[in-house]
Image (cartoon, helix red, strand yellow):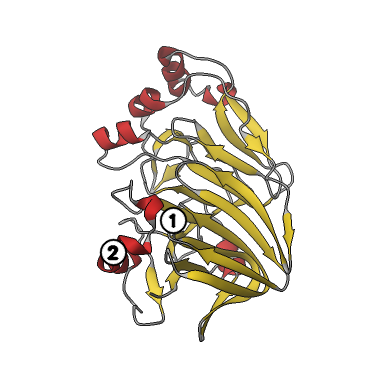
Amino acid sequence: MRILKLIPTVKDYIWGGTRLSKEFDMPAYGDRQAEAWVLSCHDDGVNIISGGPFDGRTLKDVLSNEGKSYLGTNCAKFDFFPILIKLIDAKDNLSIQVHPSDEYALKNENQYGKTEAWYIIDCDEGAEIIYGLSKDMTKDELKESIENGTILDNVNHVKVKKGDLFFIPSGTIHAICKGILLAEVQQNSNVTYRVYDYGRLQNGKPRELHTKKAVDVINLKAVDCGGKNPGKPETFDGYTKTHLSKCELFTVAKLEITEKATVTADETSFVSLIALDGNGVVNYADNCITLYKGESVFIPAGFGDVEILGAVTVLETRV
């Protein structure tokens, strides 16, 4: 059983910036880097393993061959790798969009749906997200608002700050707006229904909208802003731990390590560690793995105690 260091998959969508390459040392294949998929078994961007006996193989391949014991008992209810984690740099607004439920996505897309959580790593002053409808609407009213371009008047515009956490259930209309750098923990799905795209052109043409499917799945009830401050940090010897989000799909916490921290991977779940800031090393047995800003490691379920040394802020995700 080995801890796996992962090479991210980088996407260059039109709204992306350059922070992922400049600050996180992500591969820069073009002028922009919108997303880095730092834990992924999805066919649209599966991770490659770096170092060790599995060097050069995909995470999906290794997990398929090593069996479900690497995933843990909490993953037994899933017939797929359950989560996908991204770092997202929104230099410009993302489209207003929605993700379907599992039931709808399986029926119409042959994929699962998408519930997600956003942790705001950094943002410009005054930056905002779009979260949910601001008033109750019928399907006909929603469709008309999308088609006549007034949808921006019928959604919540929520100011954000560094350290905020937002939980976005499937069916919630939403958008990351410009000037935000965040970590996204989500179901392992790449199904998005685009509602509004600010009239932008790509290769001289508007990007496709998915109005009919979006209207089918959007929660038509008004919702509150959805934002919440994370829990209070718990102080331990050498680090603090802040619980960010917990649902039936995943649990997310932030470790702010000043000297050292011990992370335990028990039989219930694998552990994903992603460095959001600083540098450290992961020590186990007679081995060590560097964990620099932007890097990601996968610890198999049942691995036991792992020590992290250094001054590093880590996103810890479990199922």
Question: Tags 1 and 2 in contact by the CB under 8 Å rule?
Answer: no
Q: Residue at x 39, y 58 (%)?
A: 72
Disc 2 residue crowd, few under 14, some 14–19, many 20+, Cα 10 Å: few
Is residue 47 left or right of 266 when viewed as pictured?
Answer: left
Which one is earlier in the sequence, the residue at label 1 or at label 2? 2
Task: From the top left corner, tell me how far across and down residue 4 is, in percent.
Answer: 43, 72
Relative vertical location of residue 187 with respect to residue 272 in this rendering, above or below:
above
**Element carrying mark 2:** loop
Is residue 280 left or right of 82 when viewed as pictured?
Answer: right
Disc 1 residue crowd, few under 14, some 14–19, many 20+, Cα 10 Å: some
Relative vertical location of residue 289 with respect to residue 71 in this rendering, above or below:
below
Task: From the top left corner, tell me how far across and down residue 272 is, in percent.
Answer: 49, 62
Task: From the top left corner, tell me how far across and down residue 247 is, in percent.
Answer: 51, 41
Q: Which mark is residue 67?
A: 2
Give the image quarter of residue 276.
bottom right
Three-letter code, disc 1: Thr
Number of residue marks: 2
Three-letter code, disc 2: Gly
The answer to whether any part of residue 27 appears in the image is no
Residues 292 and 263: in front is 263
Report the Cα–Cα distance between label 1 and label 2.
14 Å
Q: What residue is pinned by disc 1?
A: 268
Task: From the top left corner, tell me how far across and down residue 124 is, in percent.
Answer: 70, 49
